[in-house]
């Protein structure tokens, strides 16, 4: 009986250590608590960790709070972020989940005809979403007043401001943009909007693991192994295919356009 109870306790303890909680923000159609299975990014993360014997629960919250909470060690990881130098000071970055290109959206009545560098956009009012990375140069120019940047808490708010003429440009990737415009705006409003073909940036998204946590390196290695495994098995591509429109750039990654 004692041996049985000891084995039971060991099994229960082992099961507990395999439960992970990850902080994440809404970014439909990639991730949202309102989406089937919470979107393709949670599905990829779950599948990768499942191949290593872990189960994952996602806690959805505003992006800024999710990052701050992960930085305080309240979660096992933070999903899903660009691996910029500032974040690498405190976090280990996983292998890329996917790549994404971000473009400037504008009203057709006030088009962005061409641009070579950000300093050329000083005449425009630019919308930004709180908690998003964009680029270091973008935020540096905003801080110095080279760019006139107005920040709100959601992409939907920025599109509303764009359509009302309160901002002139809004940087966002096309798949989230199409989803938002379809779900929240009338067809005649969508017709008023276009984007410039030159991307502001092309970046990869990652899971972040806090360096101060003793278990982070173990989880990082497990996730990277799992991600590689689901790519080799084809499960990764199957999950991506459920999203619909994307361009395959290699056997491992996609560029989301």
Image (cartoon, helix red, strand yellow):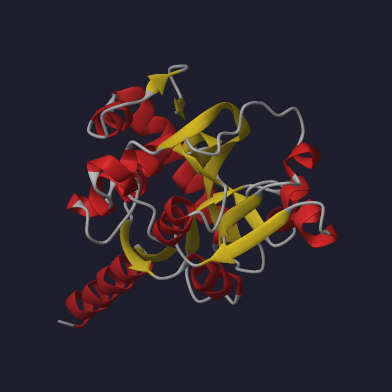
Task: Indicate whether 148 appears above or below 4.
Answer: above
Looking at this rendering, what residue extends furthest in the right direction?
A: 144
Looking at this rendering, what residue extends furthest in the left direction?
A: 1
At 54% from the left and 51% from the top, the residue drawn is 81
Is 210 in front, or is 36? Answer: 36
Tell me the quarter of the picture where residue 256 sits.
Answer: top left
Tell me the quarter of the picture where residue 47 sits.
Answer: top left
Is 147 situated left or right of 221 in this image? right
The location of residue 225, given as percent across then percent down, is: 46, 38
- Residue 29 visible, this angle: no
At 64% from the left and 53% from the top, the residue drawn is 125
The location of residue 167, given as percent across then percent down, is: 56, 54
Looking at this rendering, what residue extends furthest in the front direction?
A: 109
Is 167 in front, or is 247? Answer: 167
Task: Specify the quadrant that holds the C terminus.
Answer: top left
Task: Specify the quadrant that holds the N terminus.
Answer: bottom left
Number of callouts: 0
The location of residue 184, given as percent across then percent down, is: 27, 54
Looking at this rendering, what residue extends furthest in the bottom direction?
A: 2
The location of residue 130, given as percent across then percent down, is: 56, 64
Task: Indicate whether 247 appears above or below 218.
Answer: above
- Residue 125 visible, this angle: yes
At 71% from the left and 56% from the top, the residue drawn is 148
At 27% from the left and 34% from the top, the residue drawn is 243
């Amino acid at each position: 009986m004692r041996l049985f109870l000891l084995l039971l306790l060991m099994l229960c303890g082992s099961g507990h250590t395999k439960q992970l909680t990850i902080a994440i923000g809404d970014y439909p159609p990639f991730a949202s608590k309102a989406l089937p299975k919470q979107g393709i990014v949670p599905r990829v993360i779950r599948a990768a960790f499942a191949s290593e014997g872990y189960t994952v629960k996602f806690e959805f919250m505003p992006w800024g709070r999710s990052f701050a909470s992960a930085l305080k060690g309240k979660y096992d990881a933070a999903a899903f972020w660009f691996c910029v130098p500032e974040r690498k000071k405190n976090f280990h970055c996983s292998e890329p989940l996917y790549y994404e290109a971000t473009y400037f959206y504008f009203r057709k009545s006030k088009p962005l005809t061409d641009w070579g560098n950000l300093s050329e956009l000083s005449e425009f009012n630019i919308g930004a979403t709180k908690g998003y990375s964009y680029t270091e140069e973008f935020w540096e120019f905003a801080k110095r007043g080279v760019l006139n940047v107005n920040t709100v808490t959601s992409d939907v708010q920025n599109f509303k401001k764009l359509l009302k003429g309160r901002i002139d440009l809004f940087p966002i990737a096309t798949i989230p943009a199409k989803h938002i415009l379809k779900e929240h705006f009338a067809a005649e409003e969508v017709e008023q909007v276009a984007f410039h073909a030159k991307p502001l940036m092309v970046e990869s998204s990652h899971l972040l693991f806090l360096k101060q946590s003793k278990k982070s390196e173990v989880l990082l290695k497990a996730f990277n192994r799992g991600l590689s495994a689901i790519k080799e098995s084809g499960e990764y591509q199957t999950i991506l295919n459920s999203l619909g429109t994307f361009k395959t750039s290699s056997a491992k990654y996609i560029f989301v356009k």
